[in-house]
Amino acid sequence: MKAPPHRIKDQPGTRFGRLIDRSQPLDFRFDGRRLTGVAGDTVASALLANGLKIAGRSFKLHRPRGTLGIGAEEPNALVTVEEAGHRTPNLRATMVSVTPGMVVESQNRWPSLRRDIAGFTNLMKPLLPPGFYYKTFKWPAKLWPFYERLIRKAGGLGRAPATAPDDRYEHVHLHVDVLVAGGGLAGICAAEAAAAEGLTVLLAEETSRLGGIADGYDGSIDGLFLLDWIRARVAALAALPNVHILTQAPVVALHEHGYSWLVEKLSGPSGPDVPRERLWKVRARETVVATGAHEKPLVFPDNDRPGIMLATAARLNLRRYAVAPGQHAVVVTSGDEGYRTALDLNAAGVDVELVVDLRLRPDSPMVDIGKAMGLRVSHGSAPVAVGSIWGGASIDSVTVANRLVIEGPALKREIFCDTVLMSGGWSPAAQLIGNLGTRLPFDAALGAYRPGDLPAGVHVVGAANGAFNAADVAAQGWQAGEAAALRLKAGKKSPLNRIAADIDVTRDDPAEPVGMLPDTARRSEEARAFVDFHNDVTVGDLRIAVREGYRDAEHVKRYTALGLGPDQGKTTHANAAVVLAKLTGIDIERQPHVTFRPPWTPISFGVIAGPRQGRGFRPIRRSPIETLIAGETSLRDSSELWQRPSCYPQVGEGEEEAVRREARMVRSNVGVMDVSTLGKFLMAGSDAARFLDLILSTDVGDMLPGAARYALLLDDGGFVIDDGVVACLAPNRYLLTTTTARAEKTRAHLERWRQTEWPGLDVHVIDETERWGQFLLSGPQAREVLETIEGGAELLAGRSVAEGLLANSPARVLRTRYTGERSFEIAVPTGRTPALWSLLREKGATPFGLQTLERLRLEAGHIAIGHETDGTVTPFDLGLGHLVSAQKADFIGKHGLMRADLTRAKRKQLVGLIPEDATVVPAPGTQIVETPAASPPRRTSGHITSSGFSPAAGRAVALALIANGRSRIGKTVTFFHAGEARQAQVTEPGFLKARP
């Protein structure tokens, strides 16, 4: 055998090397080895040009693998690429362009690609059947942690970067008339026809250039060479103002109502303001799927060896990159594609030792052309064995046998070669249609799944629809574009006039669908015949799965990992269907396919997150007075996206000291707190009161202007989800305030019920959370401070809520008692908030923070959503049954509260706790233990919800939910603190009466 193949010599004027520029050599590294490619190369083509046939290792058995395909279908050549400081694993070498200085690493091997120590698992294959991990590691149970670590360490392919990348990603929203997924011949024709009718068109192509695999074929359209015709059409489309073309932008998900995801990879200079990838969220009125087809591999013993690849991939490597797969080739084909590849190889100077045609009597012009050009052809034959050297790292021969011989020794002959190129026909790449829940019927003549009935507004054309001749492909594209225009242009009755092109491209003889080869394969041969290259699933594995009762395609998929690799089974499912039909005896046309789920091709988590990462992952919301208080405290608590001051420490104070000081100040004088973050919702309309009566458990219909009430929001089950104050501002105009943490969820809750359950009610819900700034003025001197401000006295005139002017600013004042002291919530327009804050400070109000408010409400015995509630607590559990109306016919949660489980006697109830040791503050979540003397696990009866040191009481206090708690008031319960059992007395919630 000669030396490994390299790039063929430059042959000006030929069809080889169309995409490369030999005058621009590019150096890169592969597994530490310096290699040279040229401009236009992919990593896969550059490796082949440098004579490197091993591109990766399989996932399960770590068998050496070479490049199989030419694009997104590639299951073997997965690499990690480091480029310009960016390290990305699990990229397909066929889809990565070589750039100067890039570093490429193979994956799933150690210490090297050629000598992978984990390759010994191939020798253990009989011990690793499908589902072996379910059967092998069940005993002894105590070794499971060891097994688990071993399995997790073996899992995965490329390793994620050790440091977080600083890449930038964007999300873009777009509405178009027509989305065309795929920029091959069919997609170009569809876009052309739709654009000609004035429709806005988005044409999205997965690769860096339009035209699909048309460069793998010869012929002409309208008298122009096929590629020249495509270039002219693309240039014309690009010049149209109503057409937008995206390359390196596959449609990765297709959803209902014309909603699609496209992921665009941006090339060019990088920088902090330049996105690495862009996620397009597209709404299209019509969608044309023109995603082409994938060539099917053939299934025969050792069909996975490096040096065996798809015939069309080999031909395109020649035509695009001037790279030959070897020097001595055997082409195995079930259709005409193999002949096209053989003719190209022959023209490039590669010795074609034999064309093995699985068909007995093909009737095709390509066969005649091949024979006329001197190709040696064997009909009705099949490969039965592959000879390998260097530990399976390369092949040196293939054994071919007569398919007709069923009994006795077959007529075999060994052919020496260094590459085998196979073509099993085509499988439409219509998985995107499966995203819509549409089932794809199996076409027995095609040997693959193809689209059947389609949802309205969706068209599938070209090879994706089972059309593989250029005339049919172009015609379907034009027809789909015209059909989209007819649907969107209501009232246009006459058909659009599309002039048929003169297409001169050699037609194919349909490929013969085949399953396992040879037709009479033995079990030992089935165990080496791979259906799924990435996950090492063989015909033998499928036989075992069927024998063990897994006959449905979904079950077989999960039991064997069939099609679960990064390639998503693009070269797998059609062959698997044929094999499974034979093994199960089920009619192949009734063999269902697996569920095709998005994404169609792997995408990064970064592009899904888009701008929502780093600081953008949780954008910080700040109060209108942030600039005024930034220098007073750096202590912040998070409440949803809001950052709120915990307290305002003085020089030398810690947080706990500051909280106690501020709490004493509020109890004795007056304090002010920024509560602008509270949810504020205005309900307006003639049915506003009725709407609130249905939303809240509290009565609203009898409220008069100026009245305000504490209110609870319940879910369907009767559990408390939020609390706040409802106030009647005027007839048919109400205000509902809610907690900060639940404000967004409560807004969605209000709108969901308004829009879906009671759309007939005359009520509008207006979110005024950010329109109004708000302060809590609390303490014995709160009224006096408010009265010193112009307009304050008028706003306090005997009502619970009032609107008017305060310091010449529109204002709203609401009376509350959340701290246990006289309190007023004062709201003004956001722009007036800083001035009012400064004015209140001038009048003597001292600021206090969120932790101080928590301590004050704990002393008062009031609940906090998320502390005393957890989604399983009712108003009656909290001692707030008086807030549940007995008069209303209905409200959200009314029927849930009637369930027997919510009325049983031993439910947990809210109570207060006073620890015997006044200095011991039990942490929230601490369990109330009924059997303290017993060994763990101990029986518990409740837990502590809130706790802290009470300056008013001079001791530690807590709130707790305890089973039948109210009946235990005055009794003692036990909890553990720092490993020791402690006692506490059960009391009523609220501790202000206990102050010294």
Image (cartoon, rainbow, N blue to C red):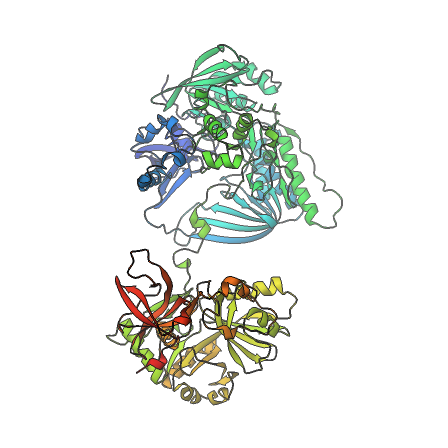
Viewer-side residue, 177 vs 795: 795
- Residue 608 percent coordinates (x, y): 46, 50
- Outermost residue, right direction? 494
- Residue 337 percent coordinates (x, y): 55, 24
Viewer-side residue, 505 vs 657: 657
- Residue 822 percent coordinates (x, y): 42, 83
Q: In this view, does 358 lie to the left or right of 165?
A: right
Which residue is found at the position 32% from the left and 47% from the top? 162
**Quadrant of image for the N terminus:** top left
Residue 374 seen by the camera: no
**Quadrant of image for the C terminus:** bottom left
Which residue is found at the position 28% from the left and 60% from the top? 933
Q: Is residue 493 above or below residue 619?
A: above
Which residue is found at the position 43% from the left and 51% from the top? 275
- Residue 524 percent coordinates (x, y): 43, 20
Q: In this view, does 287 lie above or below 736?
A: above
Viewer-side residue, 673 vs 522: 522
Q: In this view, does 408 lie above or below 23?
A: above
The picture quadrant where one finds residue 589 is top right
Count of marks placed on residues:
0
- Outermost residue, left direction? 652
Which residue is found at the position 68% from the left and 49% from the top? 488
Q: In this view, does 358 lie above or below 408?
A: below
The picture quadrant where one finds residue 924 is bottom left
Residue 590 seen by the camera: yes
